[in-house]
Image: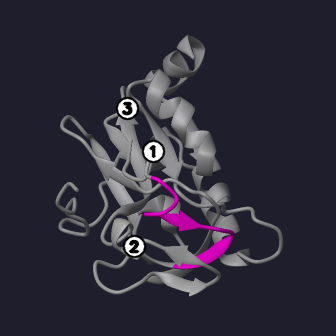
């Protein structure tokens, strides 16, 4: 992980999604937390399901995305930011109701208002954390672009990326 950290601090961008985000958050001690980690299945569970996410379309990683997008989750993390966070929340789940569009979700309240995509600034670079599966089979044709946009999210583009002020406020801790 030391090599990845040097790469990012030097201006590189690393992208991780779904369960792949946990190792980066832990090893690099990122100021992001998965609020459903360790929550018993009796309180929170989702199979392979489609959720609605609210997208900050001004962020370069989300270029071309609609203001509301369907994302595929499967045992996926649900993020909040911690003290010291520098970056932007690029997508979040609705603050009210259920984000479920298709599939199964038990414990929708644990997702309400939380982050579905986060851009963490680190040194001169960025770590893009996606709490969904942008590549899941043929379903999310619209979310493939998030992976491609992330690949082009280099220093020249990311230097001015701030996201929309007030797009996201962390929900109260449970």
Q: Quadrant of residue 120?
A: top left
Pointer 2 or 3: first along the chain: 3
- In the rendered view of the protein, which quadrant contains the N terminus? top right
137 vs 51, left or right, is right
SS assignment at label 3: loop
**Closer to us: 65 or 109:** 109
104 vs 81, left or right, is right
SS assignment at label 1: loop
* Above or below for 18 versus 163: above
Can residue 168 be seen in the rendering of this structure?
Answer: yes
Pointer 1 or 3: first along the chain: 3
* Above or below for 9 versus 113: above
Where does the image place residue 17, in percent across and percent down from the top left? 60, 49
Can residue 12 be seen in the rendering of this structure?
Answer: no
Q: State the residue position of label 2.
A: 93
Residue at coordinates 34% horizontally, 63% vertically from top-left? 114
Q: Which mark is residue 30?
A: 3
Residue contact at pointers 2 and 3, CB within 8 angstroms: no
Tell me how far mark 2 sits from mark 3, CA to CA. 21 Å
Instruction: Specify few, some or many for label 2: CA neighbours under 10 Å numbering under 14, 14-19, or 20 or more.
Output: many
Tell me how far mark 1 sits from mark 3, CA to CA. 18 Å
Q: Name the mark nearer the viewer: 1 or 3.
A: 1
> Over which residues does the magenta segment extend?
40-51
Residue 47 included in the magenta stretch of the image:
yes
Q: Which mark is residue 80?
A: none
Q: How many numbered circles does the render carry? A: 3
156 vs 138, left or right, is left
């Amino acid at each position: 992980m030391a090599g990845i950290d040097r790469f990012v601090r030097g201006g590189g961008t690393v992208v991780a999604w779904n369960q792949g985000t946990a190792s980066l958050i832990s090893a690099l001690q990122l100021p992001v937390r998965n609020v459903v980690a360790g929550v018993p299945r009796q309180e929170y569970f989702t199979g392979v399901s489609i959720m609605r996410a609210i997208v900050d379309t001004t962020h370069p990683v989300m270029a071309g995305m609609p203001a509301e997008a369907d994302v595929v989750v499967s045992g996926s993390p649900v993020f909040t930011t911690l003290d010291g966070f520098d970056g932007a929340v690029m997508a979040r789940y609705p603050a009210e109701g259920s984000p479920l569009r298709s599939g199964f979700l038990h414990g929708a309240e644990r997702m309400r208002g939380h982050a579905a995509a986060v851009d963490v600034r680190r040194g001169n670079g960025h770590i893009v954390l996606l709490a969904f599966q942008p590549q899941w089979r043929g379903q999310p044709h619209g979310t493939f672009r998030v992976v491609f946009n992330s690949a082009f999210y280099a220093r020249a583009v990311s230097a001015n990326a701030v996201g929309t002020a007030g797009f996201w406020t962390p929900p109260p801790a449970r």
